[in-house]
Amino acid sequence: MIPFGILFDGEIPPYRESSGQCSYTKISVCYVHQSARPPVEDTRDLKEIILDIHRMNVLPTTSLSFQNLFVMGFSSAKKNSTGCFSSLFGNLRKAKTLEQKNTVPERLPAYEECITTKALEHFDVKADTEIEKIIYDTIDNASSELREISLELHRNPELGMHEYHSHDLLTDFLERKGFKVTRHAYGMETAFTAEFTNGPGRRVGLCSEYDGLKGLGQGCGHNLIAISGVGAAMAIKAALESGRVKGKVILYGTPAEEITVGKVIMCNLDVFKKNVDVCMMIHPSPGDTVYHRMLAVDHVNVEFFGKPSHAAAAPWNGINALDAIAQTWNNISMLRQQILPTDRIHGIITDGGKAANIIPDYASATFFVRSLKISQLDELKPRVEKCFEAAAIATGCKVKFSWKDVGVTKDVLVNSVMGDRYTKYMESYGISYIPKSEQEQMSGGSTDAGNISYQVPLVHPGFGIHTTAVNHTHEFTAAAKTEIAHEDTLRATKAMSMTLIDILQSQDMLDAAVAEFKKNTA
Ligand SMILES: [Zn+2]
């Protein structure tokens, strides 16, 4: 008898796509001969079985008839184990033709491929299908209410720090749902918190964003982020109310992400460090990624002061502030050649003079400066300042510049303990990911969630909303209100909720997340 493969009797297990749950709950593997004798069931712990199969290394390398492989009825409700099987199923489910389906995968994934974080092997998370059901049912049942909120935020986009309607809409709703709500939190008119606890225990945080973009409305889909936080908070609250798990959930309403201010202010007050053990949020995007890089960023306003003069009658009496801006542009363009490929410097002229026949005595510009890590940004900023100073010397202008007053926006440290767990849930719902190493090559944007990631373990996955448009476009604005984007949001909300439930259930998992956090921030 050898564990010849793990398949199922002729049919790929039906996945209930809406909730993402596999409808099988029993785990068993049938050992068969190649000749397909009656199977012997194995109902040991799934991890043991995977290891066993892997150890014996007896998997078929040749194609075999799928139907003849009379094996197994099972699937995984066990959280630690879904990776292997969902990727195996994933391949088969994706197979379009019968012939493809008749081809047995060359090999099962190695155990290590499924359990990427070594520490995961030792986590004391117990599969609790009751909690899973509470989470999924709560989110599914709230779907239409969440949809209404999402569309209302989409219809009425508000700019950062002016999200008055969004703030009231969300806080009124959360209060009706039984949360302890604090409006206008942390000195910001449009920030809030909503919390629920059933007693001492671990504490998990979530973020909802809701600000829009000038001229684009919800061009970054923050209406979806808003409801993901609300939905997950409701689901975790329901799990806490069931008494099956202990602890606290806090939803933070974080304004003004687009100008990367809200969470920076909150982090300056140590809000996350003081109140939660971990934090999580999800962000709509063209694709699903967990380990993409989010850059550290700072903004700088630069002003040049010259002397006005008649541009034709007496130009020699003038000191041209616009020339200083032009010189700045050239300096920065040359600097770009000598900086890291992951650095970004980009800007606009905000004042270029008043009239073409007057030598401009005042000109100003704004630049964003970004690096992969905050430590690299700290080195890059003085080099940009030199570009301003050199332009001032060359033109005879005076220069003044100021970086963002609330402070720099840090890069996002993605906690892989939570990231891997989230990935596993999403994979079990049928979402596939490119390899982690390739995800880590993807970079571009920035978010003030980065500052949270330097306070507590954080994960900030992007989830696909069935669009090829990138964020901050009219196309993305349109995609952010579709029914399918709503479904995508609820799926990712479930994975986020379950990841945090696992933290509430497992001190081991929290310890592993904190150990990695300490290593990354040391
Ligand atoms: Zn965004």
Image: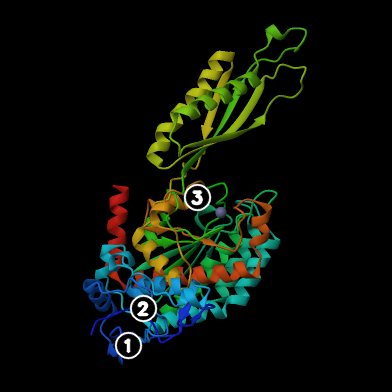
Cβ atoms at labels 1 and 3 below 8 Å apart: no
Secondary structure under tag 1 reads loop
Location of mark 2 (residue): 245
Label 1 to label 3, Cα distance in Å?
55 Å
Mark 1 — residue?
36
x then y, percent, for residue 483? 64, 70
Q: Is the residue at mark 3 in contact range of ligand 1, meaning its CB lies under 8 Å from it?
A: yes
Q: Residue furthest bottom?
A: 38
Q: Quadrant of ligand 1?
A: bottom right
Q: Given this view, does label 1 or label 3 mark the residue nearer the observer?
A: 1
Q: Where is the N terminus found, in terms of image quarters?
A: bottom left
Residue beneath disc 3: 447
Please report the residue visible at 44 percent of the width from the left and 45 percent of the height from the top. 410
Q: Amino acid at mark 3?
A: Thr
* Residue 218 appears in view: no
Callout in the foreground (2, 3): 3
Q: Which amino acid, by three-letter code, is at mark 1?
A: Ala
Measuring from the top left, give residue 404's x and y in whole percent. 52, 38
Question: Which residue is drawn at the image coordinates 60% and 20% (left, top)?
Answer: 324
Q: Is residue 237 above or below residue 268?
A: below
- Crowding at dot 3, Cα within 10 Å, few <14 / some 14-19 / many 20+, comes out as many
Q: Nearer the viewer, residue 8 or 169?
A: 8
| Above-or-below relation of 158 to 484 | above
Query: Tag 1: Cα neighbours inside 10 Å, few (<14), some, or many (≥20)?
Result: few
Question: How much space separates mark 1 and mark 2, taking CA atoms?
Answer: 44 Å
Between circles 1 and 2, the one closer to the viewer is 1
Q: Is residue 380 visible?
A: yes
In the image, 359 versus 491, the foreground residue is 491
Which x, y percent locates residue 432? Answer: 46, 65
